[in-house]
Amino acid sequence: MIIIWSIVMYIGQVSKDILKWPRPLSPPVVKLEMRTDAEYGMPSTHAMAATAISFSFFITTMNQYKYPFELGLMAAFVFSTLVCLSRLYTGMHTVLDVIGGALISAVLLVLLYPVWDSIDHVLLTSPFCPLLSIAVPLLLCYNYPKLDYYSPTRGDTTTILGAGAGATVGFWLNNQYVAPAYVGSNMGFPLVISTTVVLMLARFFVGLLVILLTRQLMKNVVLRVLCYCYKFHIADLDARRRLEVEVPYKFVTYSSVGFTATVIVPLLHQLLGLI
């Protein structure tokens, strides 16, 4: 799913800066979100991500877990629809942007589905996986389409590809060496429920804390190293938006986050007896 998410989001972000379709005009539209106003609108990457994640999750789990096919399909459809409607409600996209994003994701899912297992096998077993997982996303980030003005799309894309790269390397490492296995309990039903809930909450908060600490630590370390290398003040926002600064800053930070989430957090769970 992480690979699908990364591919879909990269194509969506690049498509925005190639097509250069403006977002809805305000007025008449009332915009409730301003952060991404500097980005172009077509296609809606929120619609793309929601469609890709919900339906890829449904496709990959329908043969592994016992639940009604119709229920899973409805859940995926409702989730993606709600996200699409939220982009219309906030005034960030037109109906065409949202439909275009959902259709692009649907086409990509259809094209990628036949090779999902092959991609997984290569990424988990190939000795070249770590090198390719880092080199290819970095190459894509450094060759991102150039705009006449600064847009957060390159930074957001680098964040996504960095997190995906770190997670992919983590999955590969887990496959090479036996990773901690999350197992259930065989105790009585009431105790199983209470124990499972406590374990889930403990894992969640421990993992969240470690990921947030990793993110903050890497942001500070990487930014200070780049400040030293390129001779700019840490508060200089224009310098931080330069290609040679923004790409390594975000890529290293979020690849560390992805690696931590897939390797360090499970090991910590095992060490703390949460598995």
Image (cartoon, grey):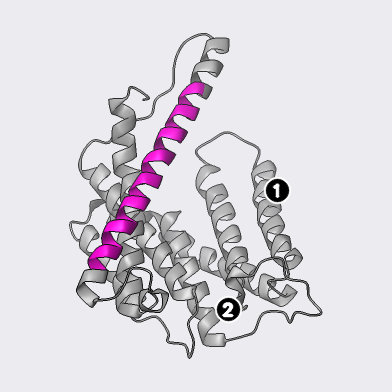
Task: Decide if residue 225 is on the left or right side of residue 41.
Answer: left
SS category of the residue bearing label 2: helix
The amino acid type, in three-letter code, at marker 2 is: Ala
Observer-nearest residue: 197 or 107?
197
Q: Which mark is residue 238?
A: none
Circle 2 is placed at which residue position? Answer: 38
Label 1 Cα neighbours within 10 Å, binned few <14 / some 14-19 / many ≥20: few
Can residue 133 be seen from the camera position used here? no
Query: Is residue 270 shown above or below 215?
Result: above
Which residue of the protein is positioned furthest toward the bottom in this rendering?
148
Numbered range of the magenta stretch: 198-226
Label 2 Cα neighbours within 10 Å, binned few <14 / some 14-19 / many ≥20: some
Q: Which mark is residue 74?
A: 1
Percent x, y of residue 110: 53, 65
In this view, the mark in front (2 or 1): 2
Which residue of the protein is positioned furthest toward the left in this rendering?
127
Query: Is residue 157 shown above or below 59?
Result: below
Observer-nearest residue: 108 or 266?
266
The amino acid type, in three-letter code, at marker 1 is: Met
Task: Decide if residue 86 is on the left or right side of residue 267.
Answer: right
